[in-house]
Image: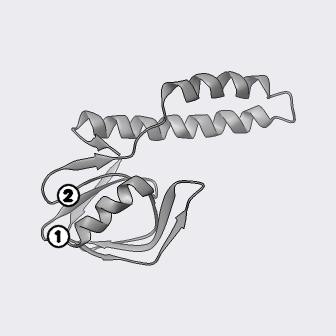
Amino acid sequence: MKSITGKLKMLGNSTVFSKKNATVYSIIEIGDTILSNIVIPNGLDNYLRRALNQDGECTLYLWRRRIMGLRLQDQKMYCDEPLGLPWFIFMVPASIITIPVFGMGLIGLYITYKTWRARSRSRELQAMGAIAV
């Protein structure tokens, strides 16, 4: 997971996807770094907007093009709430059972794997003291 620290200078245009519970920013400028097409969970978006109005540096924790967590100027850290274990307990067998149906289960297993990796990143931030929102 990559971290970028600096003063949050600009949030570009955003598009909210309610089905995915996420917002996509066209541009985020933090310090001397410009990020484009960045996805942030809606729960973290409020804290990102708060960081824009505060003085001092904040830290964004990125995984690919997704903000998994952030540390504000007051040193409070927030991260995305991971999916619970029951979701995975349901999805793995359901995906395996549906493999014979045109290989649809393989798509389910791929989505489950990606979700598990995102969950691991969130757990990593929680171990660093982040509050899940």
Look at the numbered disc 2 and give the secondary structure of its residue. loop
Q: Is residue 132 above or below residue 63?
A: above
Residue lying at 16% horizontally and 65% vertically, measured from the top left: 57
Q: Is residue 42 above or below residue 55?
A: above
Give the spatial CA distance, label 2 vs label 1: 9 Å
Q: How far across and how far down the image is residue 27, in percent?
A: 41, 75
Disc assigned to residue 7: none
Give the class, few, some or many, for how many residues have Cα within 10 Å of label 1's Cα (few <14, many ≥20): some
Task: Say which residue label 1 marks.
Answer: 54
Residue lying at 35% horizontally and 34% vertically, measured from the top left: 123
97 relative to 1 in the view: left or right: right
18 relative to 117 in the view: left or right: right
- The answer to whether mark 2 and mark 1 are in CB contact below 8 A is yes
Q: How far across and how far down the image is residue 92, in percent?
A: 64, 25
Q: Closest to the observer: 51 or 61?
A: 51
Give the class, few, some or many, for how many residues have Cα within 10 Å of label 2's Cα (few <14, many ≥20): many
Q: How far across and how far down the image is residue 101, in percent?
A: 86, 31
39 relative to 70 in the view: left or right: right
N-terminal of the pair, mark 2 or mark 1, is: 1
Q: How far across and how far down the image is residue 43, in percent?
A: 39, 53
Residue lying at 54% horizontally and 24% vertically, measured from the top left: 86
Q: Closest to the observer: 99 or 87?
A: 87
Q: Closest to the observer: 12 or 30?
A: 12
Look at the numbered disc 1 and give the secondary structure of its residue. loop
105 relative to 118 in the view: left or right: right
The number of numbered discs placed on residues in the rendered structure image is 2
Residue lying at 18% horizontally and 50% vertically, measured from the top left: 76
Name the residue type under label 1.
Gln
Colour mode? one colour
Name the residue type under label 2.
Leu
Disc assigned to residue 72: 2
